[in-house]
Image (cartoon, rainbow, N blue to C red):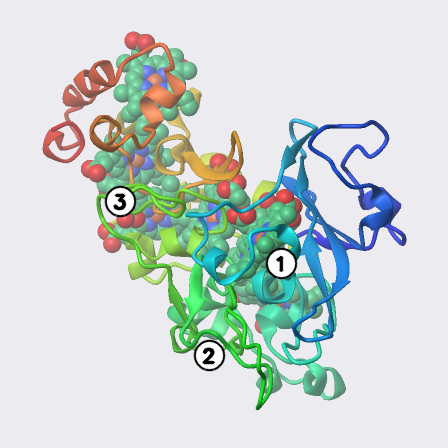
Amino acid sequence: MANVVLDPALHPDAVLGDFAHPDPARTFDISQVAFVYGSHWKQRYFARMIDPNTGLPDYYVLPAQWDVAKKKWLPYHVPHNADWWVPHYGATNQQRPTGPLCDGCHSVNYNIRTHQVTEWNVGCEKCHGPGSQHVAHPTKANIVNPGTLDSVRANDTCIQCHSQGRPLANPISAEPGDTHPQYYDWPVGYLPGERLADHWRLEELRYGVTNFYQFADLSAHKNRMQGNDFVQSNMYHRQIRCFDCHDVHSHQNPSNLIARGNQLCLTCHTSKNPAGLKGTVSEHTHHAPDSAGSQCTACHMPRIAETLKGAYVSSHTFRFLSPTLTEQFGIPNPCTSCHTDKSNEWALGQLRTWKNISPWRVAN
Ligand code: HEC
Ligand code: HEC
Ligand code: HEC
Ligand code: HEC
Ligand code: HEC
Ligand code: HEC
Ligand code: HEC
């Protein structure tokens, strides 16, 4: 994972947004920016301020963000009826401090009392737990290795940040007598090795509802919901972990993947494996082996979770979304998202001719 949070005065190279030319969406200049946030999909800009409620320094997000791929400014403001916390804060970005709303996931050891961190980044201790004793006397016993935890707690080390949810108790007081307890959007108090469910509940999803968080089949509608998605997959039930596919220590492949393309999936989904494909890849996909339509991710991980207007991250339920779901609920399906000149009816007609899948499940 990249360094996410950087001070532009110390790291001018980290600034991706165009501050040289005026733009109607951008109402601030670089001198107001204390931190730049993000580099991959989007960059947001933090100004420092004193929180009038606590008298402590805090940050707030300036009202424009940079779309990295399209190289353009977009407004940034979480509207009413979007995230659950909006009604608990004021209407403007300046009334929404990043301490309770962002920083726990983008730093190490965010202290809710002092607002201090040990590091602005997804640092080692966020996944391996407190490490000072380990640094002084390195043994396997005084550090958490997610690789040796049970699969629930192993996945929890990732889900702590890669999910939408709420702390079990909210608002949270920073100290006894705190007159301004705040609503946090990250799992305050959770440490790797613990069960996340003792601190955090995933956003409640409801079948048939389409909103900021979810499509009607419960697939994620927005980014940072890989955990909410993945717990719905049979792979999660079979104790597969996020890091069976991602090596967070390696940037050798895109998205920190352990292998590229279909090779990743086919390490497990061999014909010898009960979870495997019964025949060849082509027999399963009904496309030529080297076709874009034969990539496992094209049908099982469509890019439908919005991170910016018009930019999406991949679904992690691994379900095939039938064109029937498009007809019923407007959920985009992989067939007509790629075959943009074809109708849902055409795709359903094709699927009904595929003898090795059930029409009851995918084309009814
Ligand atoms: C985003 C989460 C994450 C971060 C950040 C992270 N690690 Fe890891 N680390 C893991 C996971 C998950 C494993 C287990 C991988 C596996 O078993 O496949 C691991 C394994 C390791 C191992 C191997 C342990 C063994 O017994 O083989 C070492 C050493 C390690 N990490 C060191 C570090 C250091 C040092 C840092 C900071 C520079 C760091 N990690 C940051 C998630 C993380
Ligand atoms: C402290 C919060 C945190 C934890 C814990 C965490 N992540 Fe992340 N992860 C992030 C953030 C923030 C980003 C976006 C970083 C960026 O801009 O590159 C990210 C990005 C990623 C990416 C995309 C990287 C890319 O270059 O496309 C993958 C894959 C990922 N995380 C997997 C994991 C896995 C697997 C674990 C558990 C072992 C994990 N993360 C734990 C916060 C976290
Ligand atoms: C519960 C943890 C969590 C909270 C709270 C959180 N984020 Fe993130 N953020 C993530 C993770 C994980 C990712 C990467 C995965 C993804 O976007 O799907 C991410 C991605 C980002 C990115 C994109 C990074 C890139 O390189 O493109 C930005 C910018 C960002 N967050 C800013 C914020 C801001 C601003 C807030 C508060 C308003 C916030 N985040 C709150 C976990 C969190
Ligand atoms: C580490 C092994 C492993 C890897 C890697 C892996 N799978 Fe799986 N997969 C499984 C297991 C185990 C099951 C569960 C089979 C069962 O219980 O019926 C499964 C089930 C599935 C299912 C059934 C539906 C569901 O609810 O999950 C799909 C679809 C799937 N995998 C797609 C993929 C794709 C796509 C990839 C590559 C991006 C992939 N798998 C990579 C092991 C793996
Ligand atoms: C062109 C679309 C398409 C592609 C590409 C595709 N699949 Fe599928 N896959 C499907 C459909 C449709 C189903 C049936 C879904 C259902 O019954 O709900 C399915 C079901 C599955 C299942 C669960 C049922 C079973 O057969 O065991 C697994 C596992 C799976 N696919 C793995 C993969 C892997 C691995 C790849 C890449 C080699 C892949 N798929 C590529 C469309 C596709
Ligand atoms: C079965 C394999 C598999 C598992 C398990 C898995 N991922 Fe992924 N993930 C992928 C693949 C493949 C991609 C890239 C998809 C693409 O580029 O088309 C990806 C992409 C991502 C990204 C980059 C954003 C994007 O979609 O481009 C993040 C962040 C991420 N995964 C986090 C996680 C987290 C957190 C977990 C566990 C909760 C997890 N993944 C579990 C296969 C997996
Ligand atoms: C990522 C893109 C992609 C996805 C997803 C995809 N296809 Fe395709 N499809 C292609 C391409 C490219 C071709 C051209 C021939 C080839 O490469 O196999 C094709 C060819 C076809 C053909 C034969 C040619 C034609 O136009 O009559 C059919 C039928 C078809 N696809 C149906 C489907 C169905 C049904 C789905 C969903 C289950 C699907 N495709 C998903 C890319 C895709």
Give the residue number, with chain letter if any, for mark 1: 95
For marks 3 and 1, give the CA distance. 30 Å
In which quarter of the view is residue 248 placed?
bottom right
Callout 1 amino acid: Gln
Could you classify mark 1 by the number of other residues whose Cα lies within 10 Å: few (under 14), some (14-19), or many (20 or more)? Answer: some
Q: Secondary structure at mark 2?
A: loop
Q: Residue lying farthest bottom?
A: 176
Element at badge 1?
helix
Please state which of residues 139 and 273 is positioned toward the viewer in this rendering.
139
The residue closer to the viewer here, 190 or 319, is: 190
Judged left or right of residue 78, residue 351 is left
Looking at the picture, how far across and down is residue 346, in whole percent? 22, 13
Quadrant where the C terminus sits is top left
Identity, as a three-letter code, of the amino acid under mark 3: Val
Give me the residue at 15% from left, 19% from top. Answer: 353
Q: How many numbered marks, from 0 up?
A: 3
Q: Residue at x 65, y 26 (%)?
A: 70
Which residue in the structure is indicated by mark 3? 209
Q: Which comes sooner in the sequence, label 3 or label 1?
A: 1
Q: Which residue is mark 2?
A: 194
